[in-house]
Image: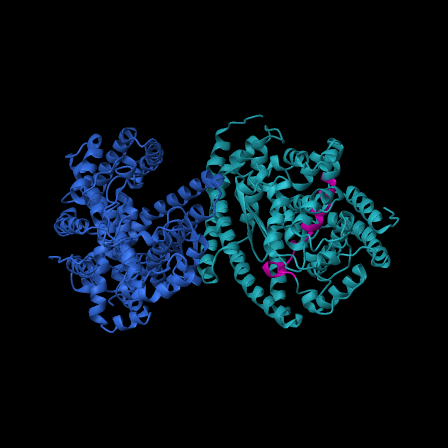
Chain colours: A cyan, B blue
Amino acid sequence: MGDANSVNIARLKEYWTEIDDLSSIGMVLYWDKQTKMPKSGAVARGEHLSTISSLIHKRMTSPELAKILEDLGKEEAHLEFDSDEAGMIRAARRKYEEATRLPEKLIKEKAITASQVYMSWLKAREENNYQLYIPDLKKSVDLGRKTAEALGYSDHPLTALIDQHEPGFATTELDVLFQEIREFLVPLVKNITLSGEAVSDQVLLQYYEPDLQWRLSQAAVRTINFKLDQGRSDKSVHPFSIYFTPDDVRITSRIKENDFRPCFFGFLHEAGHGQYLQGLPTAFRRTPLMGGISSGMHESQSRLWENIIGRSRFFTDNIYPVIRAFFPQQTKGVSADDWYKAVNAVKPSYIRVEADEVTYNLHIMVRFEIEKGVLEGKYRVEDLEEIWNAKFKEYLGITPPNPKLGILQDIHWSGGFGGGFQGYTIGNIAAAQLYDQALEDQPDMLNEFIKGDYSSLLTWTRRNLHDYGLKYTPQQLLEKSTGEKLNTKAYFKYISNKYSDLYGLKINQ
Amino acid sequence: MGDANSVNIARLKEYWTEIDDLSSIGMVLYWDKQTKMPKSGAVARGEHLSTISSLIHKRMTSPELAKILEDLGKEEAHLEFDSDEAGMIRAARRKYEEATRLPEKLIKEKAITASQVYMSWLKAREENNYQLYIPDLKKSVDLGRKTAEALGYSDHPLTALIDQHEPGFATTELDVLFQEIREFLVPLVKNITLSGEAVSDQVLLQYYEPDLQWRLSQAAVRTINFKLDQGRSDKSVHPFSIYFTPDDVRITSRIKENDFRPCFFGFLHEAGHGQYLQGLPTAFRRTPLMGGISSGMHESQSRLWENIIGRSRFFTDNIYPVIRAFFPQQTKGVSADDWYKAVNAVKPSYIRVEADEVTYNLHIMVRFEIEKGVLEGKYRVEDLEEIWNAKFKEYLGITPPNPKLGILQDIHWSGGFGGGFQGYTIGNIAAAQLYDQALEDQPDMLNEFIKGDYSSLLTWTRRNLHDYGLKYTPQQLLEKSTGEKLNTKAYFKYISNKYSDLYGLKINQ
């Protein structure tokens, strides 16, 4: 372990305590804001969150930290790459560099602009008119460019923005990935659409009593071993998961009375994120190693439990008797097989968050290509509604009838243009890749699943992802856990097997 | 306004922003801890709260603040005493001095000891054995003495400890107050007890469905104009009120299934505190003037609405039809007059938090006398159980059968010995004094009350207390609002009128 107990590592840990505490405290403020706070508390809460941010920023960019990192730099070469100490230095340096590269003036400009752009996004949505959004979206794009320049990049400005969410991922790598996805998914979606209404989701579109939905969903997340008693579950408009310590992990969900999916699968999704958070080592608390690696790695966990497990045949067979007990009326004459088909129905639709497992990545691809084109100067902001619609037609076969169902649906670009979407696709693909490896390492798992026992899979993810905290970048982690960098093999295999069966198709990989 | 817009005032405000934000943030953490946090989150939450405290302490004792206050000292003489600026300087200096006078070593020692003493208090309670508490209570007393020495005092060490909760109140003043209370209340309680069971509270001791209790209580606090939509109400084991901004004020209460009082009057009590917090000027946010003056002034507001209004004849007449609608079974054949008598029944009892309006101050007097005697060295910690019981017998006519119903009932001495109790009595007395003045200023109020309109009283407290924030000490405030320092006249008049009527007694003031 080299100089494992060095004085400088101790200095770094001691210094970091306050940063990690403040970050957790900020998350308490955020959780309360999203779940419990009365509207009238918003102004003060904004100020409090901003005070926390600037205290963290100050401490993250101080000369004292620079000195500690400089002193540690001399020791790093003697440390094993896989040691906690080396990982801690890498993680701290990454954060220090990101924080110091962004000038404070730019950070403030972004914060002020973000709330302006957000307001104008709300207005444009309300009036269903993209034109109203253009001037402010331009500001957002402009700040995205400035941010990319300040952070620096090699291949493409988008890489700098992606790096904030997905350290180490280059735009060119993602280009290859999306190229493969395009070639695989676009014809598949076409074939599924042509196959007619063989698979229907009508059974899910009945009235499901909200309270019962909530209780059923809680039962479901317990079966996948999310510890609800070491956290909470609450309602919120936009579902999310958050942690203050691995011993206090909170998830939220929302309920639609006339659609079974948002509450049930939303709960499984957030519990998947929650698994990751509950699995982070408490020993890493208050150190630079604390946290989930990236949006994509986080999404790999939520998608694993929401889709690969939650929408599997075995999970359906396990939980369906419970669902029937909760909703005897709605499920009358509906077999487990019918239900399985319903929750896996594929249908091109306009809204990303409602998209099925097969079309989802195409939604992301549209956004990724637009971000790339805009930052390159290839696309003008004025033309994005048309570009969006054309790409949508090309990939999904349908054209959004209005901007609310198209380019105005996401909040992301209001917060800052660029780099906010690719994590969803990385997560979908990584979920399949990790799951494939877990099955190879633990072939008995499938038999346990059939009995309703999902604990081995959780254990595997603990050991191969959660336990590492922030020690590795996403690609380093995947190589370590699966022997390969992120790639589409397992994902295509998973989609092929599942949907050729469901839709009676022959799928070429 | 003198040098109202001085550069130095601007420096002070700017400097204070972070202190006030951190203090509000700490309150969010505390609220969540008491209402929503899973037990497993406690360790991290303790660390986060302690990080907030030490950030506040650091900023409150910095040489930078010392310099600002020094510079302001030169200007203070030119400012009107009643100006916001002068009040701001006084409030800031008070806090600066309190923070700097306590050595950091002592603060840490107190924090560590407090949790030890708390554990030993829990254990002693569990085993109902005061002996087990003695060694740790001695430590608490010792630290109370050290704190008093560090803070400094003129007449009595207890004054230094009282000053932390009730700025400007001397032990000798309180001695006089309690002397008067003793002479007035002890014989009164004796007479009431001798008068027999004329007034019974049996009707309150039935099963009241918890959910209905909660909804009824919310309706009740709405009638006194607490804005529930600019805050929240939640359940907690120990009821409290808290604010993050005057626009987000949260109260909590608890429910006893077989006693109507804790939920209903607890709600009114906390809503009374909440009125104060919702009334603090938003213009004072993030400045040294933000906050409630003292425990006693806070208690004056909770007692005003819980007792003087909440247990009045007019309030009962207003709310009783609603109570009957909620609980027709329990109130069958019970008239509004019966109900009024029941909620005002006087009966010497062991537990402070359950004590009625008349005996309550005697509970406080026992504690005040003990704190004083111990700090003087007149009482030994070893003898306190006997001393407690003897005083209890003398003042209330009953002897606690065991320490859980006696000396072990309160948490206060575990957190730090001395100065934690007098606020309850100051509040009871100040409530009557303020109310008396309000009636004199606005004689029409009683007619409005009869119609169920309590808004004028709230307006009066806004103008005469809430609006000032931390500008004055309690005595300065009372002099300004009522023309007199704290005194027992109005309180004795209020008690005499109400209870001579209720118990058919002739009471000599």
- Residue at the extreme top: A2
> Does residue B248 appear in the picture of this structure?
no
Q: Nearer the viewer, residue A151 or B479?
A: B479
The residue stretch that appears in magenta: A410-434
Lateral position of residue A369 relative to residue B113, left or right: right
Lateral position of residue B352 relative to residue B218, left or right: left
Q: Residue at x 44, y 48 (%)?
A: B35
Q: Nearer the viewer, residue B508 or A87?
A: B508
Tell me where residue B470 appears, x and y as whole percent.
28, 58
Lateral position of residue B103 relative to residue B18, left or right: left
Residue A418 colored in magenta in the image: yes
The number of numbered discs placed on residues in the rendered structure image is 0
The quadrant of the rendering that contains the N terminus of chain A is top right
Q: Is residue A119 above or below residue B109?
A: below
Q: Nearer the viewer, residue A355 or A414?
A: A355
Lateral position of residue B280 relative to residue A401, left or right: left
> Does residue B418 appear in the picture of this structure?
yes
Tell me where residue B381 appears, x and y as whole percent.
21, 32
Instruction: State the image quarter where residue B121 is shown.
Output: top left
Residue A469 colored in magenta in the image: no
- Residue at the extreme front: B333
Tell me where residue B461 appears, x and y as whole percent.
28, 65
SS majority, magenta: helix
Tell me where residue B434 appears, x and y as whole percent.
22, 62
Q: Residue at x 33, y 36 (%)?
A: B114
